[in-house]
Amino acid sequence: MLSVLCSIFFASFISLFIFRKLAKYVGLVDKPNLRKHHSGAIPLVGGISVFISLLLTLSIYSPFDGDVALYLLCAFILIVLGALDDRYDISFKYRLFVQACVSVLMIAIGEKSLDSLGLMMGNDIIALPGWASYFVTILAVIGSINAFNMVDGIDGLLGGLASVTFAALGFLFFLSGNVDLLYFCLILITALLPYIMLNLGFPFGKRFKVFMGDAGSMFIGFTVVWLLIEASQGGEFKTIRPVTALWLIAFPLMDMACIMIRRVRKGQSPFQPDREHLHHICQRLGLSSSHSLLVICLMATLMAIVGIASDYYALNETLMFCLFLLTFGVYFYVITHIWKITRYFKTKVEDRILLPD
């Protein structure tokens, strides 16, 4: 296994340098604007590199069965869609249509769907009928893809959050004895490492910086939801309970939900980009990009640990679902009132300083 991980690490590292050259030639780059404050034109090839490295590794070391072939086909479609969006800025309506079509492929051919929500709402298992299963699965796929797309706003964040989720899933696969999917998670994390390094400017500095691009965020989001469905569905063969899946991707889901609710309340499109995500708020509060990355990844790790612990100790699913909703409610309130909250504490600190001894 070590040789496989070393192979995909170097394949991913080398492919980044190859694709970044091609990206500049074809114009697949991200340029600064009012919403994007980086310097220079940055190649949008992180996701393409990770996918190609994964494809080569699976081709060499693992025979393709039907599931793997279908996953790679769906991922390839999303990579192409994302690359076209990176280059030509496709309408979100077309993106959603293709994402829905990929979801249907996954359901109809691969029989991967959310058929059960477990015991989230009481003592009876919530089994979804066929039409509801299709609808919920399509919604989950589109939600996961766009959740990871929306968090890709500062260096290292998408790669860091994806690594947290894949690491948590890998640990749960290890506990359940599912070695194949454990190795798959390790391969994904290893393929992401070179991207994270270059994205953060290590070891060659900002000159060789690359971004994930929509191609990468769509690929990551789809891979996450594919693995969560693999893990949480399947009756006696499932690895985790459905409610645990919410905790493993809690931060991307909550950030997306908060942003979309705020945009709709303002009368805007929920898919209209802005600078109101948590990483933007952290920076306006005075945190550096690296400190914001650390804080958010720690939050995501804490939530994943809660999910792992609840699954390992078989805590009541309804309780964990209610706790998740409560966590989201607190998160939404804090983010919505963040400036009032910070002013309140700032005033309290200033009053204490000005009080005489």
Image (cartoon, rainbow, N blue to C red):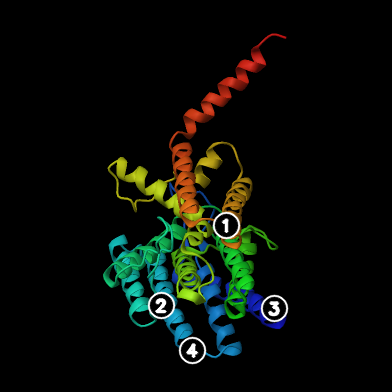
Give the mark nearest the N terminus, 2 or 1: 2
Give the mark nearest the N terminus, 1 or 4: 4
Between 44 and 65, the one nearer to me in the picture:
65
What mark, if any, has residue 74 been given in the picture?
2
How many C-alpha atoms fall within 10 Å of the one at disc 4: few (<14), some, or many (≥20)?
few
Give the mark nearest the N terminus, 4 or 3: 3
Q: Amino acid at mark 2?
A: Cys
Q: State the image coordinates of residue 74 (x, y, percent, origin top left).
A: 41, 77
* Local secondary structure at mark 1: helix
What residue is pinned by disc 3? 6
Give the mark nearest the N terminus, 2 or 4: 4
Q: CA distance from mark 4 to mark 3?
A: 24 Å
What residue is pinned by disc 4? 65
Q: Is residue 34 above or below residue 183?
A: above
Q: Give the residue at the far front of this rendering.
A: 123
Q: CA distance from mark 2 to mark 1?
A: 32 Å
Query: Which quadrant would the C terminus be assigned to in this image?
Result: top right
* Local secondary structure at mark 3: helix
Q: Is residue 320 above or below residue 352?
A: below
Indicate which label's residue lies in the foreground, 2 or 4: 4
* Local secondary structure at mark 2: helix
Q: CA distance from mark 3 to mark 2?
A: 26 Å
Q: Amino acid at mark 1?
A: Ser
